[in-house]
Image (tube, rainbow, N blue to C red):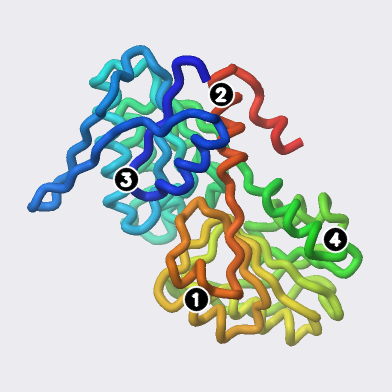
């Protein structure tokens, strides 16, 4: 970690602190201010000249505020003569707007990628993108980290592989589900999902055998938990013994936690790519796993010019 420093915005200070602990370095000193009219300003409180800077910032709600923090902090670092700036974005906001789903609609994930590049960021590290092809929106290197190792360790200690079936909530998530099923030597199934409106899901069918099995639904994020609740009902209807949900990003907006508690879902397993609310942290249905060591190891390997992909082999 010679000549490398870690800074963070305000979105996920606990995660940034844990990453620094893993790397055995101090968190960089910077101050982000808000003026009375809502404008943001960043001031770097130590020399960064010639350093490789890693900025930890999840663009989670309030998404627009956190994106602007990342851009302004990165601009301040660039103007302070940082040699290289890597944005570590555990949760990439706007990732669900990765294509035009109707005429005259934006592709906001691409717009955010352009803003990041314009701010002077030279590399992006992110975790479990909603769609892998978002990497192609950037004209700079993107290291796509998978939370799989964190979840696999937890699931192995909790579940019996012979009784476990991994379920994808839709066809788009089958590659992720297949990877989990292969590592855990578990069965594989899928639900047939329709989404008539944003944050509204209808589960029509279950494809695969889940009768008498402990089912784990794997997805990249859980937002209002509407899809998860509907999937849980359908899986229990098909004879599943228990239903758990495994998602990297716990957005948990609106009445998500209430929806989870009123559902058949036994446990929701998330990571700290988004800091859990007090309500989520206190819930006996929600388990938060830390991704700090995984990101810390990725940062260490980037500074040494070593492979990151071997983390997942």
Label 3 – label 2 distance at C-alpha = 23 Å
Quadrant into which the C terminus falls: top right
**Where residue 152 appears, x then y in whole percent?**
74, 52
Residue 302's mark?
2
**Where residue 106 appears, x then y in whole percent?**
34, 52
Residue at numbered disc 4: 186
Residue at numbered disc 3: 67
Which of pointers 4 and 2 indicates the residue nearer the eye? 2
- Quick check: can you spot residue 139? no
Mark 4 crowd level (few <14, some 14–19, many ≥20, 10 Å Cα): some
Q: Secondary structure at mark 3?
A: helix
- Of the numbered discs 4 and 2, the one sitting upstream in the chain is 4
Question: Which picture quadrant has residue 41?
Answer: top left
Question: Which picture quadrant has residue 42?
Answer: top left
Say if 180 sits above or below 301 in the image: below
- Of the numbered discs 3 and 1, the one sitting upstream in the chain is 3
Label 2 – label 1 distance at C-alpha = 37 Å
- The residue positioned 14% from the left and 52% from the top of the image is 38
- Of the numbered discs 2 and 1, the one sitting upstream in the chain is 1
Q: Are marks 3 and 1 in contact (CB under 8 Å)?
A: no
Q: Is residue 261 left or right of residue 191?
A: left
Residue at numbered disc 1: 257
- Of the numbered discs 4 and 1, the one sitting upstream in the chain is 4
């Amino acid at each position: 970690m010679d000549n490398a420093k870690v800074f963070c915005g305000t979105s996920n200070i606990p995660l940034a602190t844990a990453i620094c602990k893993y790397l055995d370095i101090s968190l960089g000193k910077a101050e982000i201010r808000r003026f009375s009219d809502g404008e943001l300003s960043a001031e770097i409180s130590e020399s960064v000249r010639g350093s490789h800077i890693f900025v930890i910032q999840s663009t989670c709600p309030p998404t627009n505020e956190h994106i602007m923090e990342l851009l302004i902090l990165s601009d301040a670092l660039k103007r302070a003569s940082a040699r290289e700036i890597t944005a570590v974005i555990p949760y990439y906001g706007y990732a669900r707007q990765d294509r035009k789903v109707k005429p005259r609609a934006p592709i906001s994930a691409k717009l955010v990628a352009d803003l990041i590049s314009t701010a002077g960021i030279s590399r992006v590290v992110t975790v479990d993108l909603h769609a892998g092809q978002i990497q192609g929106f950037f004209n700079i290197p993107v290291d796509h980290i998978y939370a799989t190792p964190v979840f696999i360790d937890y699931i192995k200690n909790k579940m019996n592989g012979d009784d476990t079936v991994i379920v994808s909530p839709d066809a788009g998530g089958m590659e992720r589900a297949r990877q989990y099923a292969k590592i855990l030597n578990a069965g594989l199934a899928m639900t047939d999902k329709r989404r008539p409106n944003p944050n509204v899901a209808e589960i029509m069918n279950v494809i695969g055998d889940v009768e008498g099995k402990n089912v784990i639904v794997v997805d990249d994020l859980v937002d209002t938990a509407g899809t998860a609740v509907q999937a849980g009902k359908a899986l229990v209807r098909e004879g599943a013994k228990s239903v758990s949900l495994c998602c990297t990003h716990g957005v948990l907006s609106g009445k998500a936690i209430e929806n989870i508690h009123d559902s058949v879902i036994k446990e929701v397993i998330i990571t700290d790519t988004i800091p859990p609310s007090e309500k989520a942290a206190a819930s006996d249905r929600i388990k938060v796993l830390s991704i700090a060591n995984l990101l810390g190891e990725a940062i260490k390997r980037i500074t040494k010019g070593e492979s990151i992909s071997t983390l997942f082999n």
